Amino acid sequence: MASRFSNVDPVTAADMRRQGLDPHELDRSTEQLMSLIHGNLPDPPVSTTARLTAFRARPSDGVDRISRLSDALLRDIVSRLPVKDAARTAALAARWRGIWRSTPLVLVDTHLVSSARASTPDVIAAVSRVLAAHQGPFRCVHLTCSRMGAYQAQLKRWLRLLAARGVQELVLVNRPWLREVPLPKTLFTISTLTRLYIGVWKFPDAAGL
């Protein structure tokens, strides 16, 4: 059975073996580089590790007091949730249905899948669904766990959508197959960005920007 690699594609691995090189060495060194990159990225403003403290329930009088809060307070609550949980609040009651779609979006792709090693097609599909469902604005978007080499057209669509929805913070890291993936020029047209972190891309020709 052929060995599986995290960061070396099968063609490159086979070519290295023909040259008497060990693709495992390249895979390990690339994994160390990716760990270094991810370790220096900013933490997203929401987390899936928060723990809720359970208190003894009081007798209910049947009144939904949370739904009586103002839209501004409900949006503040929703904005602190991971995107999957935030979207699910629409099922709580009719009062909540429009809250998530009008709350500034915080999207972290690793929060959409069960594992950081989830397949790229699964991540691409999940991110695309969220971006299509939310009307904006986009407060913060972290896209860090996909190999975008085969999805450059999709990435360009995402960036056009992020530009249209006024994204403020963007973290964009490609997982390499050790082939240069060009960074779409669309990125440099997003005028609303206040923070940008990018990694493992080939920069476009500056003369064409």
Image: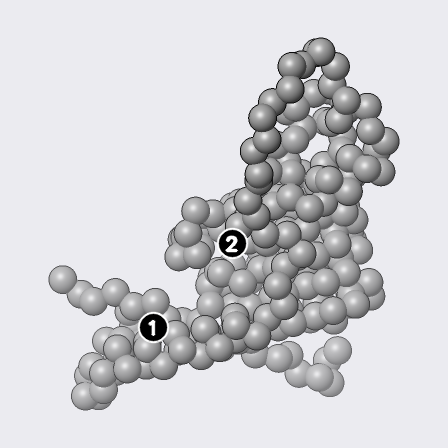
Judge whether 171 appears above or below 65 on screen. Answer: below
**Crowdedness of circle 1 by 10 Å Cα count: few (<14), some, many (20+)?**
many
On the picture, is 33 further left or further right than 186?
left
Q: Which residue lies furthest to the bottom in this view?
A: 20
**Crowdedness of circle 2 by 10 Å Cα count: few (<14), some, many (20+)?**
some
Q: Residue at x 66, y 83 (%)?
A: 205
Q: Which residue is drawn at 23% across and 87% down?
A: 21
Of the numbered discs in the image, which one, if any, rests on residue 157?
none
Estimate the x, y position of residue 161 in percent, counting from the top left. Answer: 71, 52
Which type of secondary structure does the marked residue at label 1 adopt?
A: loop
Estimate the x, y position of residue 176 in percent, counting from the top left. Answer: 44, 71
Estimate the x, y position of residue 47 in percent, counting from the top left. Answer: 59, 52
Judge whether 209 appears above or below 169 on screen. Answer: below
Query: Residue 58 or 6: which is nearer the viewer?
Result: 58
Q: Residue at x 62, y 72 (%)?
A: 198
For the residues labelled 1 and 2, the Cα–Cα distance comes to 21 Å
In the picture of the structure, the residue carrying the numbered disc 1 is: 8
On the picture, is 48 further left or further right than 89?
left
Give the quarter of the figure containing the C terminus. Answer: bottom right
Query: Residue 170 or 95: which is nearer the viewer?
Result: 95
Q: Tell me the quarter of the picture where residue 92 sits.
A: top right
Q: Is residue 171 visible?
A: yes
Q: Residue furthest left?
A: 1
In the picture of the structure, the residue carrying the numbered disc 2 is: 110
Q: Which residue is drawn at 75% across and 54% down?
A: 139
Which amino acid type is shown beneath numbered disc 2?
A: Thr
Q: For the residues carrying marks 1 and 2, which lies nearer the camera in this image?
A: 2
Mark 1 / mark 2, whichever is N-terminal:
1
On the picture, is 123 further left or further right than 92?
left
Estimate the x, y position of residue 61 in percent, counting from the top left. Answer: 71, 11
